[in-house]
Image: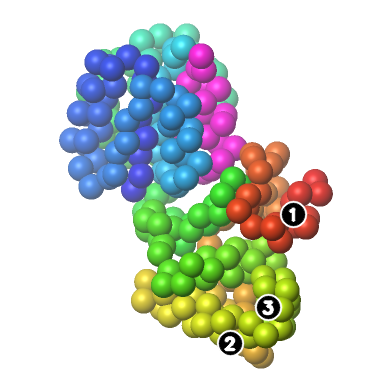
Amino acid sequence: MNIILVDDEPLALKMLKNAVSEAVPDAEINAFTKPREALAFAEKRPIHIAFLDINMQFISGIEMAKKLKAIYPKVNIIFSTGYEEYALDAMKLYASGYLLKPVCIEDVCEVMKNLRYSVEHSKRLIIKCFGNFEVFCDYQPIKFKLSRTKELLAYLVDRNGALCSSAEIVSVLFEDFNNRDYYQKLRRDLINTFDELGLSQCIIVKHGGISINRDEVECDYFDFLDGKISAKPSEYMTQYSFAEYSPVNKE
């Protein structure tokens, strides 16, 4: 479970971190005094829960919550503040909780029992397409043996579950049919890595083709196509040239 804490008051942030660390000892917790740094972190690493101070300089907790929701529609937002008058605004964002400072362990334990979105049953494979393409298993980055295996996976995701032939993939990724042998190495690396991680159900291989299994993946691009994200949060798969021709860039 990944949790971020954001409060521009260092002492309040320290107290919040102590309370959350004791209430949720198995979680990975990252604390930030600068909201922009927290947002940059969220662009790179999936998060389950965000504890946000509401009254912050430059960007309010309410505005930050909206930005996080655009990236992760099912992130649990928990506000912490010294002011009760923000409660209505917080509830409009379907927040999972609203805590008054100073936050104590008991408060955190109680709010964790009533999260709006489950974290125990979330899918193990998480893929981020907006911004740079990134892939995670159990919230840890997946490392492939071959550097371009990640690009192969990105193309399968971009094809939105369609079965892709070897000829199609080679022509798009390499623009040279002489690279078939290298493609087969990438394909084996992808399948073997997913097998080792217990993610074999996330890839479909049949009739000489390969595809991503949409039903087994948590992916912001799929959420966007399904209407779960109302607006494209940021640029799409910025490191891959083939993404320029994706339907998402024509919206």
Q: Could you say where residue 30 lies in the image, as x and y percent from the top left? A: 32, 36
SS category of the residue bearing label 1: helix
Which amino acid does the dot numbered 1 rest on? Answer: Glu
Q: Could you say where residue 16 lies in the image, as x and y percent from the top left? A: 26, 24
User: Dot 2, crowdedness within 10 Å: few (<14), some or many (≥20)?
Assistant: few
* Residue 79 in sight in this render: no
Q: Using the image as rendered, state which of residue 233 and residue 150 is in the foreground.
A: 150
Q: Could you say where residue 34 lies in the image, as x and y percent from the top left? A: 41, 22
Residue 195 lies in the magenta-colored region: no
Q: Residue at x 51, y 82 (%)?
A: 185
Q: Which residue is mark 2?
A: 181
Which amino acid does the dot numbered 3 rest on? Answer: Val
Q: Residue at x 76, y 49 (%)?
A: 249
SS category of the residue bearing label 3: helix
User: Dot 3, crowdedness within 10 Å: few (<14), some or many (≥20)?
Assistant: many
Residue 75 lies in the magenta-colored region: yes
Q: In terms of sequence position, does the residue under pointer 1 or pointer 3 come before the other?
A: 3
The circle drawn on residue 170 is 3
Is residue 113 shown left or right of residue 15? right
